[in-house]
Image (cartoon, grey):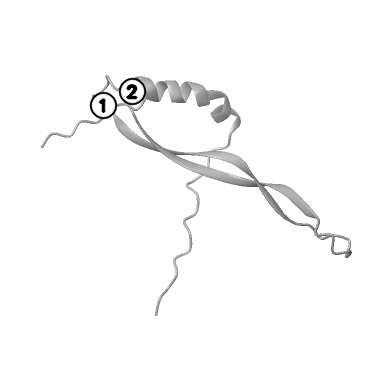
Amino acid sequence: MKVEVYDDLDPTVTEDVHLHTFSVPGMEVRAGSGKGDGDGSGDFETRLIPSVQYYEIELGPDSLNKLHDALKPFIAAARECGPPPKGRKIRTK
């Protein structure tokens, strides 16, 4: 069985294509009940909550270079860090 992998941006590219996983920060709007002034009016407040969306994409060398070029100004201003912490494992008895 032959498996071919295609660049998700350029399906004509099938050589040297690799899967890349990345995250994109964003802000999620959440509505909740406000503290109110005790009059029972049920005031609501909205707030922005930081969020992260994860993506996977298969890219060949040219498409990967385009992604790197688009991110250059952000990478230049960023601090390098390690991977995000993994979630806590729940122990079962």
Residue found farthest to the left: 1
Residue drawn where x is 28% and y is 28% of the image: 17
Tell me the tag on residue 75: none
Image: 44 above or below 2: below
Using the rendered view, name the quadrant where residue 39 is placed.
bottom right
In the picture, the quarter occupied by the C terminus is bottom left
What is the distance, in whole Å, between disc 1 and disc 2 at their CAs? 7 Å
Percent of width and height locating residue 70: 50, 22
Q: Could you tell which of marks 1 and 2 lies nearer the N-terminus?
A: 1
Say left or right for 28 vs 90.
right
In the picture, the quarter occupied by the N terminus is top left
Residue drawn where x is 41% and y is 22% of the image: 65
Residue drawn where x is 48% and y is 63% of the image: 88
**Is there a contact, CB below 8 Å, between mark 1 and mark 2?**
yes
Residue nearer the viewer, 40 or 11: 40
Residue drawn where x is 50% and y is 49% of the image: 84
Structural crowding at the residue carrying mark 2, measured as other residues with C-alpha within 10 Å and reported as few (<14), some (14–19) or many (≥20): some
Say left or right for 28 vs 93.
right
Percent of width and height locating residue 46: 73, 48
Residue type at the position of mark 2: Pro
Percent of width and height locating residue 81: 52, 43
Residue that carries the numbered disc 1 in the rendered image: 16
**SS for callout 1:** loop
Residue nearer the viewer, 42 or 70: 42
**SS for callout 2:** helix
Using the rendered view, name the quadrant where residue 55 is placed.
top left
Residue that carries the numbered disc 2 in the rendered image: 61
Percent of width and height locating residue 47: 72, 48
Residue type at the position of mark 1: Asp
Residue nearer the viewer, 41 or 29: 41
